[in-house]
Amino acid sequence: MQFDVTIFPDDLNTAANIARAVEDRGFGGLWTSETAHNPFLPLTHAAAATERLLLGTAIAVAFPRSPMITAQIAWDLAAQSGGRFVLGLGTQVKPHIQRRFSTPWTPPAPRLREYVESLRAIWANFQTNKPLRYMGEHYQFTLMSPFFSPGPIEHPDIPIYIAGVNKILCRLAGEMCAGFHVHPFHTLGYLRELIIPNIEHGATKAGRTRADCALSCAIFVVTGRNDAEIAENTGFVRAQIAFYASTPSYKPVMDMHGWGDLYERLNGLSREGRWAEMGELISDDLLHAFAVVAPHDELAQAVKARYTGLLDRVGYYFPFNPDAADQAAIWRNAADVFANRA
């Protein structure tokens, strides 16, 4: 099991130093996300500043970008990093696709399948100059002149991860992707009963195995240096869990465990803007179902014990900050445990 970190650099000029610090601690990978900033730009700095780290997006939103645009960005990052780049893609939800990105919405799974297929068709053209011809319902690519082709690179087989919560996207990942980003809002039961069986279903369809699709997740954790800090962090994580538990996209997780009534209550509070009240509805049992709770010096051991045999890459659902003195023990513990030094 590899331990990765996520970074959210507000200043691109800090990304190289952060990436060096990640590599110096011996972690396996570094991920960026599409939140307030572009997910690809920090990775250009990270690639130049490191030598062995896996570098990837967790995630970049697929549909607002033409696959041609994404293919070119990924190709350049794969070349720059010497084959260490992983393209992680997500579908986002309908309101964001339509209202934040002003992009048409269609059923995401068939469209994402074509997106991945068209990326590979474009990359094959870049690498071999094979005529570009991809004809799908959502994407068609039939033109590439030499002037616009970047040409072959040393590591053309760029791994693609996708993210999701439902069985259809799990099956798609198992069938045709190198990995799957498991959402932090999950339980062990959801992993065992829905995610992994459907990854395996898709893999079997394509003559692959579960081992061909790595499962990666940034995990909800409650931690601190003492009881007071753990108590303070508990309130924050309860609020995170309540937010996701109130969202229609994640209702299947709640329904699996018979928590549909709680979803309705939380969803109603969210519609009324009563955010402060929502975390109070997350019981201790629910907290422990969705999060790992442990002090700084025991957190990595607890995560490893919980997810061994289920996940291949793990991290924490908060950003790595090498300058935060109050987090130093967290990262030291993770480095020791996942490098088998503890």
Image (cartoon, grey):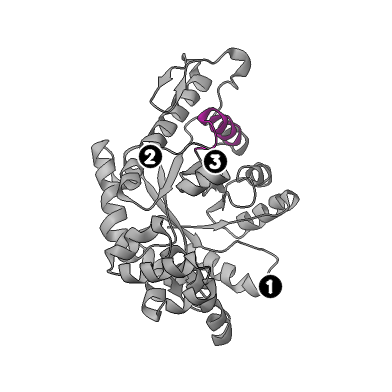
Residues under labels 1 and 3: Cα distance?
30 Å
Question: What residue is shown with label 1?
Answer: 325
Q: At x 60% / y 73%, what residue is drawn?
A: 329
Q: Amino acid at mark 1?
A: Ala
| Above or below, 96 relative to 64 | below
Of helix, strand and loop, which one carries label 2? loop
**Rendered location of residue 330, percent (x, y):** 57, 71
| Above or below, 13 relative to 227 | above
Question: What residue is shown with label 2?
Answer: 107
Q: Quadrant of the N terminus?
A: bottom left
Q: Which residues are magenta?
A: 63-77
Q: Is residue 191 left or right of residue 277?
A: left
Q: At x 40% / y 69%, what residue is drawn?
A: 290
Check residue 301 for magenta coloring.
no
Q: Dot 3, crowdedness within 10 Å: few (<14), some or many (≥20)?
A: many
**Rendered location of residue 16, percent (x, y):** 70, 50
Question: What residue is shown with label 3?
Answer: 85
Residues under labels 2 and 1: Cα distance?
45 Å
Residues under labels 2 and 3: Cα distance?
28 Å
| Quarter of the rendering containing residue 177 | top left
Mark nearer the N terminus (1 vs 3)? 3
Q: Amino acid at mark 3?
A: Phe
**Rendered location of residue 148, percent (x, y):** 61, 18
**Rendered location of residue 78, percent (x, y):** 56, 35
Image depth: mark 2 or mark 1 in front:
2
Residue 64 is labelled as none
Instruction: Say which of 245 and 339 sits in front.
Output: 245
